[in-house]
Image: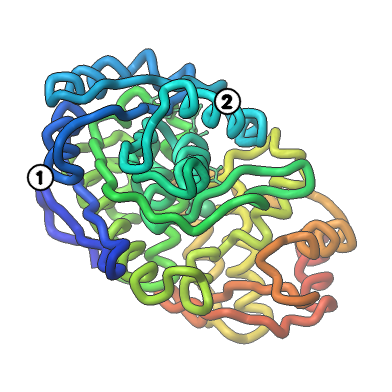
Amino acid sequence: MADSLKTSHIYRVDLGNRSYDIHIEPGCLKGLGPALNQLLGKPARCMIISNVTVAPLYMATVRSSLEQAGWQVSECILADGERYKNLDSFGQIMDALMQARLSRNEPVIALGGGVVGDMTGFAASCYRRGIPFVQVPTTVLAQVDSSVGGKTAINHPHGKNMIGAFYQPKLVWIDPEVLRTLDCREVRAGIAEAIKYGLIRDAAFFTWMQENMQAALALDPAVISTMIHTCCRHKAEVVMGDETEQGARALLNLGHTFGHAIEAMTHYTEYLHGEAVALGTLLAARLSEQAGFAPQGTETAVTDCFRQAGLPLAIPAFDAAMWLDAMGHDKKNIGSRIRYILLHEIGNAFIADDIPADAIEQLIQSYQR
Ligand code: NAD
Ligand code: MG
């Protein structure tokens, strides 16, 4: 169910000595300095890591908040884009950290979308074997999903997120107002990940998203706030139950096995991650129906919702062998089996490890008729 409207709220992600708060509040960007003092004690040095798009928009606000609270701030500004989520940018962060001589208890702050957040978290896990890090997510996707849960990574030419670590932030600081400068296409892609929570564990939230889609797309403050609250609560609950994805956390990968294949087959140039996940979710919904796990009408309901969100609906035409090959290289597979997240119904997902290749061939062919 969608959480009731709140203007300020904190969720605690309870993970023993790795616990942290998710703070969601419009306008909170300018309050990060005092929050960091409260969290880490006496101010010292810190580094803000961002990119060339986000820094001109929000660096000054975050920086002055930290400086006013007594922090000595340095910056590391990376190139913008998934293709820079790589070892070169990682090296650039390491160089900046060495130059700034950050010590073991001095934090880095990720100011940006999922790309900046994933890279900063991974760098934080490695520099001096681990320094504190704070997530300040600035995209819908990062605010509803990637900033919570401690999955950090960079890409390798052989695969997405292949080099990484589970490393939890010390704080997630979410200001929904920063979404106003985001591209409309990016908003839609982030909303796809929000809908995902409805599909895997909260049918009432799925319905709520449908009812409030236009307001969400227009970034209506109350609706966006409720959406972020609900998603962060779900993400936190899932992560608390299975921090390192030994089991149920895998449900968050609904649409991702097919989605990653789509991203790989189109060389990461045609679809945003959230768009590929939406298409992957459509495939998962059809497969769920074809295999008799989900009632008829499930795929249609999912399609209608994504249509309302203005997400792409056309499954790209590749032959089944290419799909299987692309999915065989998905690192989430255990052994050689391909792992799919499927639906019993909307709001109830499960892990399927035993879907035969023919069922996938049939599925792909059903789009080519
Ligand atoms: P992104 O970080 O590339 O951001 C999208 C674009 O929006 C970029 O051009 C960025 O510079 C720009 N931008 C960011 N904030 C803005 C703002 N407020 N105003 C204007 N422009 C802004 O993409 P994303 O969708 O946020 O994240 C995708 C990444 O997240 C992928 O690498 C994916 O693997 C990762 N991810 C990680 C997890 C996890 O659990 N760690 C979960 C899902 C996705
Ligand atoms: Mg994702």
| Colour approach in the figure | rainbow
117 and 297: which is toward the camera: 117
Is ligand 1 less than 8 Å from the beta carbon at label 2?
no
Which residue corresponds to the image point at 61% horizontal and 43% vertical from the top-left? 154
> Compared with residue 356, is residue 120 higher up or lower down, i.e. above or below?
above
The mark lying in front, picked from 2 and 1, is 2
SS label for mark 2? helix
Residue 285 is tagged as none
Residue 92 is tagged as 2
Q: How many marks?
A: 2
Identified by mark 2, the residue type is: Gln
Residue that numbered label 1 is attached to: 7
Which residue corresponds to the image point at 66% horizontal and 43% vertical from the top-left? 155
Identified by mark 1, the residue type is: Thr
Viewport quadrant of the C terminus: bottom right
> Compared with residue 90, is residue 262 higher up or lower down, i.e. above or below?
below
Q: Is residue 268 visible?
A: yes
Which residue corresponds to the image point at 42% horizontal and 69% vertical from the top-left? 243
141 and 72: which is toward the camera: 72
**Residue 193 placement, left or right of 148:** right
Please state the horizontal and vertical placement of residue 242, each as a whole percent of the image. 42, 74
**Residue 45 placement, left or right of 5:** right
261 and 164: which is toward the camera: 164
